Image (cartoon, rainbow, N blue to C red):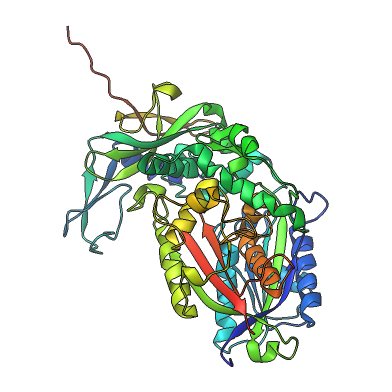
Amino acid sequence: MDVPRHWREQIKRYRLVGSKCKKCGKLSYPHRLVCPKCRSREYEEHQFIGRGKIISFTNINSPPKEHRYNLPYAVALVELMEGPVITAQITDARAEELEIGMEVEMVTRKIMEYNEDGIICYGYKFRPIVEYAHP
Amino acid sequence: MSDNVSVIGVGLGKVGEHWEKSLRDLAIESIWMAFEDSGIDKVDALYVGNMSSGQFVEQEHLGALIADFAGLGPIPAVKIEAACGSGGAAFIEGYMAVKSGMYDYVLVTGVEKMTDVLPSKTTSILANASDRDYEAFNGVSFVGLNALVMRRYMHEFNVKREELSIFPVISHKNAPFSKHAMYRKEITLEAVINSPIIADPLTLMDCAPICDGAASVILCSEKKAREFTDNPINVSGVGLATDSLGVHDRVHMTTLSAAVEASKKAYKMAGVGPKDIDILEIHDAFSIMSALSLEDMGFAKKGEGTKMALEGQHYIGGDLPINLYGGLKARGHPVGATGVYQIGELVYSLRGDGRVDAERGLAENIGGSGATISACILERGG
């Protein structure tokens, strides 16, 4: 029963696709059918680049049951460089490394595996931006 | 006078882990306590405040269930849901029903039975008050959302975690007097600061407990109320407002815009301002919510929500006593019932319980992380 609920969110979650108001240009993630700024109902899909900075964070010690196999994990409010703020887990970082202002980038990761229906849900997490050394 | 709505009966059940009692047992117990308190035993309508009976005990259709088992007859009875703000929202529905002249006597019952499921399931159910697909899906618990707001608040206003720890101490200070409270004991600041971290920077003792409880109040016109009492407690102003469901969509991450809006409406209706409020019941589900509530309802400047608390002004005897029956932290937070408990507690204080001489009080009830907030002003009818 949970399958269609997660299936229909796939593109939005895997590619970070939200919406852009055609009237005033306001960007939203998740997508909205009515612009929160000008109430226009004309919108188009908008794919976010997937970079931003942490504006707040916490480490979850007492998780909802469907996330109990992921402990420990950090959750942050990430302000995307295009403006909207989203709620996401932070990965590939130690809890003590996290700080407000830290620059992060989106990665596609497994969010839940032990769903009652046996489906594996993927989605976005964010990790500190790594500067790769090119040979 | 003829237009005023009064509260003529209050029934507050003991809050706690009631293994031996079902949701209906708790609700009906509080209803008959309210009947006894009011002197009537019949009402024209019932509004039930409840957040998640379908998830906690797999029972929906609470209006009919409770009307049936409480022996209320074939009256209209519906459930009002606004997450942890359900009780306050149900009270406002009841108020409007009397105010409109539709019904003479209205019963408002808040009830939640949370302890039949394991704590991790409770955490999951409470997360349903947030945006399920875009907040809870990503693993943020309800405590986690409040922790995100708290860290941002500490960052923006240079407030220390230990300063916010004062709020649970204040609520617990009043709890030994509160017969229906879950934890009837005082706690120390050190205990709050040093309790285990649930979602940093929030500690266990910053958070209101999971519990069962039910509260009922009976409303009627002041004219009818005067047939029962010379000193009715009137509802002089109510306000309910909403904000973005997700914390991430808030224009100001550290402002409860719905508290600003709801309190403005209530003040306007009552013809008063924050300075005219003698006592407050605030929604201290998490310490951070106390500070934000005080600021956003006009009792403190932005960023200074802990100031009066640290000066001792929120204890009984101070300038603005808060949470006189233990607040959510010590009385307990049976989510959908909380808003009705707050109203009942205000009525007790305004009737005179020997501790404060208050003319007017305000109850603030928050649903979710601030997406629904109600403010209700009650005062002595004189």
Quick check: can you spot residue A116? no
Q: For this view, does B139 lie left or right of residue B221?
A: left
Measuring from the top left, give residue B108's x and y in whole percent: 66, 72
Quick check: can you spot residue B280? yes
The quarter holding residue B109 reads bottom right
Q: Is residue B144 above or below residue B268?
A: above
Q: Quadrant of the C terminus of chain A?
A: top left
Q: For this view, does A124 lie left or right of residue B127?
A: left
Q: For this view, does A59 lie left or right of residue B102?
A: left
Q: Is residue B380 above or below residue A133?
A: below
Q: For this view, does B150 lie left or right of residue B43?
A: left
Q: Is residue A10 above or below residue B329?
A: above
Measuring from the top left, give residue A131's x and y in whole percent: 23, 18
The quarter holding residue B225 reads bottom right
The quarter holding residue B352 reads bottom right
Residue closest to the eye, A76 or B197:
B197
Measuring from the top left, give residue B117's x and y in whole percent: 69, 44
Residue closest to the eye, B259 or A71:
B259
Question: What residue is rendered at 42% in x and 55% in y?
Answer: B245
Total numbered circles: 0
Question: What residue is rendered at 40% in x and 25% in y?
Answer: A91
Q: Identify the residue at the far right of this view.
A: B20
Residue closest to the eye, B360 or A42:
B360
Question: What residue is rendered at 76% in x and 71% in y?
Answer: B31
Residue closest to the eye, B240 or B201:
B201
Q: Is residue B121 above or below residue B280?
A: above
Q: Identify the residue at the far top of this view.
A: A135
Measuring from the top left, give residue A49's x and y in whole percent: 22, 35
